[in-house]
């Protein structure tokens, strides 16, 4: 028997209001493009029509940038399950822009079968003129091997302005001295046209320092710091970005690089740049595609995201490299507080005979095996798999006592216990001085993750590697 219109709308209103108000990030793999309606279950009696969309709390962010993240637009016809699902997708998409510390997507009102939607956001702080101090070594374990020397610190000033014009653009300017003298400028505009699909990124950097990592032996970086000319690096790039829908991102980068090193480096390692060269200038052209469908892009627990790229470095024999790389991150929710995560990375460089500066693989940046942080593994091809089981043990807020701030009146914390196991392999055609290449690498251990606002993530690991070595490691991640 068909329900009356008034009775059905009343029930639907409360169901959708509650579901929208407390919607959590999406766990589905929906790939609906921006401003298109996802496929919904049509078994409901009658569809609803999206009416007006009200946005509150965006003092700086342009309203159309927020609307860009929605899987629906005014005039779309949706059924009740699809409306709830759309709220979940919208909240996740908005939260993953890194523009807001809180997002609510809910029904505002019914007008017959027309529904009005309200979006309430709390914006972050966007301007960060911060003093900067950081060890130059790959991680804290490597810095400890160097005796925690103050002379191995970079310090200076970093100015970052997120959401510079309210279009989720970013402006960065760095002035760094200490171990490395560095100047860097970058501007990122993802929405450069009216369709909000095309963007660009421009950047320039210069750095110089007296000490340089000239080779790797016994799986350790080797440095020389008695140089007269040191090492100097220049780089400039321009990128074109394209985002056709909600979750897929394309980027094409063209860069020009120049490096000059002291002749002592070439005497110690003739293959640093290539046969007896102490300076090199080369272009880079790359294409990258990203897909992001996770609950929280900086600390994904559910959903998946992937990246694939192809890079051409150099045009002539003095610098000649093709690189294919890929990354997949997948997360599952096993129960209310338990999660399992899988990360896969792969790199292939050709031809296999590459100069030293093109052989850095595991142990640099985020590409490392937990438990092998003390080492670097150079190669021209490699594969890595990380498996992690997490359990949420605490979730709480600490008041900031900023009475005038409605958006920063508390600091949220989530704490997870973790167990993990990593597996990897690095291939190196010519390396005879390092024992960890051309063999299976593995490690495992226990850890704790602390996640707080502004994407600060603290990782404490106690791990055991294939060499029988144990250790406690700290990793800190943030975008500042």
Image (cartoon, grey):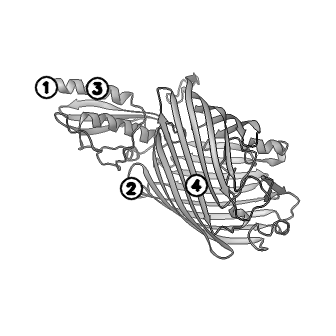
Dot 3 alpha-carbon crowd within 10 angstroms: few under 14, some 14 to 19, many 20 or more:
some
Can you say whether 438 is above or below 344 in the image? below
Closer to us: 447 or 278: 447
N-terminal label among 2 and 3: 3
Q: To which residue does mark 3 refer?
A: 15
Q: Secondary structure at mark 2?
A: loop
Q: Which residue is situated farthest in the left direction here?
A: 1
Can you say whether 107 is above or below 66 in the image? above
Can you say whether 378 is above or below 452 in the image? below
In this orientation, does residue 453 appear?
no
Q: Which residue is situated farthest in the front direction here?
A: 439
Whole-angstrom CA distance, mark 2 to mark 3, is: 32 Å
Whole-angstrom CA distance, mark 4 to mark 3, is: 45 Å
As drawn, the label of residue 138 is: none
Q: Quadrant of residue 303?
A: top left
Q: To which residue does mark 2 refer?
A: 244
Q: Which residue is situated farthest in the right direction here?
A: 226
Quadrant of the rendering where the N terminus is positioned: top left
N-terminal label among 4 and 1: 1
N-terminal label among 2 and 4: 2
Q: To which residue does mark 4 refer?
A: 346
Residue at (37%, 56%) from the top-left corner?
A: 194
Residue at (80%, 70%) from the top-left corner?
A: 270
Dot 4 alpha-carbon crowd within 10 angstroms: few under 14, some 14 to 19, many 20 or more:
some
Counting labels gives 4
Whole-angstrom CA distance, mark 2 to mark 4, is: 26 Å
């Amino acid at each position: 028997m068909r329900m009356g219109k008034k009775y059905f709308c009343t029930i639907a209103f409360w169901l959708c209001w509650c579901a929208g108000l407390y919607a959590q990030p999406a766990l589905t793999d929906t790939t609906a493009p921006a401003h298109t309606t996802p496929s919904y279950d049509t078994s409901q009696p009658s569809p609803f029509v999206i009416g007006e969309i009200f946005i509150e709390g965006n003092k700086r962010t342009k309203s159309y940038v927020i609307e860009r993240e929605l899987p629906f637009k005014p005039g779309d016809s949706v059924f009740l399950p699809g409306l709830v699902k759309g709220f979940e997708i919208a909240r996740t998409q908005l939260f993953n822009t890194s523009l807001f510390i809180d997002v609510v997507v809910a029904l505002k009102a019914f007008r017959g079968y027309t529904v009005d939607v309200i979006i309430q956001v709390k914006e972050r702080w966007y301007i960060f003129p911060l003093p900067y101090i950081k060890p130059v070594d790959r991680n804290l374990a490597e810095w400890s091997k160097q005796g925690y020397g103050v002379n191995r610190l970079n310090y200076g000033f970093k100015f970052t302005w997120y959401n510079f014009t309210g279009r989720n653009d970013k402006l960065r300017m760095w002035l760094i001295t200490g171990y490395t003298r560095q100047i860097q400028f970058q501007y990122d505009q993802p929405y450069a046209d009216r369709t909000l699909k095309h963007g660009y990124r421009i950047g320039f950097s210069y750095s110089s320092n007296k000490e340089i990592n000239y080779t790797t032996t016994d799986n350790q970086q080797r440095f020389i710091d008695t140089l007269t000319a040191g090492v100097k690096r220049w780089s400039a790039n321009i990128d074109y970005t394209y985002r056709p829908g909600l979750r897929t991102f394309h980027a094409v980068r063209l860069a020009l690089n120049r490096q000059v090193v002291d002749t002592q480096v070439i005497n110690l390692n003739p293959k640093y740049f290539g046969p007896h060269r102490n300076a090199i200038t080369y272009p880079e052209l790359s294409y990258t595609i990203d897909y992001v469908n996770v609950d929280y892009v900086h600390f994904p627990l559910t959903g998946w995201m992937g990246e694939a790229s192809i890079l051409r470095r150099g045009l002539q024999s003095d610098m000649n490299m093709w690189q294919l790389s890929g990354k997949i991150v997948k997360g599952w929710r096993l129960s209310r507080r338990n999660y399992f995560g899988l990360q896969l990375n792969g790199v292939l460089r050709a031809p296999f005979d590459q100069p030293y500066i093109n052989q850095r693989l595991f142990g640099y940046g985020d590409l490392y095996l937990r438990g092998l942080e003390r080492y670097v593994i150079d190669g021209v091809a490699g594969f890595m798999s990380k498996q992690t089981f997490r359990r949420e043990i605490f979730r709480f807020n600490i008041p900031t006592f900023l009475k005038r701030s409605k958006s920063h009146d508390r600091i949220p914390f989530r704490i997870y216990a973790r167990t993990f196991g990593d597996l990897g392999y690095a291939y190196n055609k010519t390396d005879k001085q390092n024992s960890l290449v051309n063999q299976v690498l593995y490690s495992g251990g226990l850890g704790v993750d602390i996640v707080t606002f502004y994407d600060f993530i603290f990782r404490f690991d106690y791990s055991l590697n294939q060499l029988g070595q144990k250790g406690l490691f700290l990793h800190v991640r943030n975008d500042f």
